[in-house]
Image (cartoon, grey):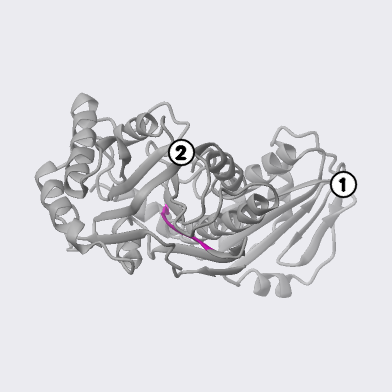
Amino acid sequence: MNFTENAIYPPKGYTAAGLHCGLKDGGERDLALIVSDRPASAAGMFTTNRVCAAPVQINREHLRDGRARAVVVNSKNANACTGEQGMADARQTTRWVGRGLGISPEDVLVNSTGVIGVPLPMAYLETGIQTIIPQLDVAGWDDASEAIMTTDTAPKKASARLQIGGCEIAIAGIAKGAGMIAPNMATMLAFVVTDAALSAHALQNALCEAVTQSFNCITVDGDMSTNDTVLALANGAAATNELAGENLRTFQTALNAVCIGLAKQIARDGEGATKLITIRVAGAPTPDDARRVGLSVANSNLVKTAVFGRDPNWGRILCAAGYSGVAIDPDRAAVSMAGIPIYANGGGLPFDRDRAVDALSASDVAIHIDLSIGDASATIYTCDLTYHYIRINAEYTT
């Protein structure tokens, strides 16, 4: 398998585009479109927030038949908490895209991200959709990845190429997210397409497994958005038989890699972040227990600020693990930060503090927790919490 982040291996049969249609004030791209040239199996996972945006509700409807051809995304405006008008606007967007592409509106998946509670400026979207369709191109992924950004500082892209059954399969994904990121479909959006052949059922199962290992293992600030969405399309353009058995497992490994790559980029680009924090929990009774401990530590503002301040404060880590709800034994647990053992056998270990502070200055910081009460493990990704996060969110609409 060839895997890359920050670049796209275009799967066969797809085109993409991104442009400025007037939603953002500074002329940045704010409308994206991804299209399959043939019917595709489709799958999706969405926010579990009961306050969910109109596009989430429309996409759930459109995915009932497991088919789709196009994904349209606007940034700057979430079309959330906008009532019946928001639903009508989301449906109208699918009609405009469907008419322009000559496909059914039910084969269009609509997505929005940005400020909550503001009606969509539909005149801008109508003109933007008319303009973007002629710009669709196999090389349009970079523009599309930029168009879906809100407070992101960089676009998120990941791809994989692999050989299955004598055919080259490609998987490509783009994502956005920097704030309001929490597990259970942590405002993040991700769109993954492949030219492999999968049934809608198989694609949904594969996406669920990939999301469990990736987007549901990241947290920036513990806030769950109204719009969180991950969509996947599989159009079979690589001329393979429908994947099954060992071939499907090979595909799953590649899909997991793409989704984990995107998820790590989201965590690294958390609002105001300066460090990616990777929390590895081992020795847990069950995978769910390992994940709960990891997320408890990852969501601790005290842990996140300690990493920002280069403070090797193991007490904050043990405290967060202790209130996770998992029955840990502090006398059996061991903790290391940035590769330096700092806690074991019920107490702190002697360590070179200056060396630890220097190690915590890196842009990638690892925290390892061994509970020593089982065989299960989990990996969680988060970022440090900085002064800049407060400034971004204090001034988000003002």
Question: Residue 255 occupies which quadrant of the picture?
Answer: bottom right
Q: Residue at label 2?
A: 224
Q: Main secondary structure of the magenta part?
A: strand
Q: Position of residue 105 (x, y in %)?
A: 25, 37
| Magenta run includes residue 380 | no
The residue under the point 42% across, 51% down is 191
Graded by Cα atoms within 10 Å as few (under 14), some (14 to 19) or many (20 or more), the crowding at tag 2 reads many
Q: Residue at label 1?
A: 372
Answer with mark 2 or mark 1, whichever residue precedes in sequence: 2
Please, is residue 73 above or below residue 169 in the view? above
Graded by Cα atoms within 10 Å as few (under 14), some (14 to 19) or many (20 or more), the crowding at tag 1 reads some
Viewer-proximal residue among 355 and 89: 89
Marks 2/1: CA distance? 31 Å
The residue under the point 28% across, 41% down is 78
Viewer-proximal residue among 22 and 327: 22
Quarter of the image containing the N terminus?
bottom right
Viewer-proximal residue among 2 and 322: 2
Q: Position of residue 341 (x, y in %)?
A: 81, 63
Local secondary structure at mark 2? loop
Q: Which residues are magenta?
A: 169-178
Q: Is 100 displayed left or right of 68 in the figure?
A: left
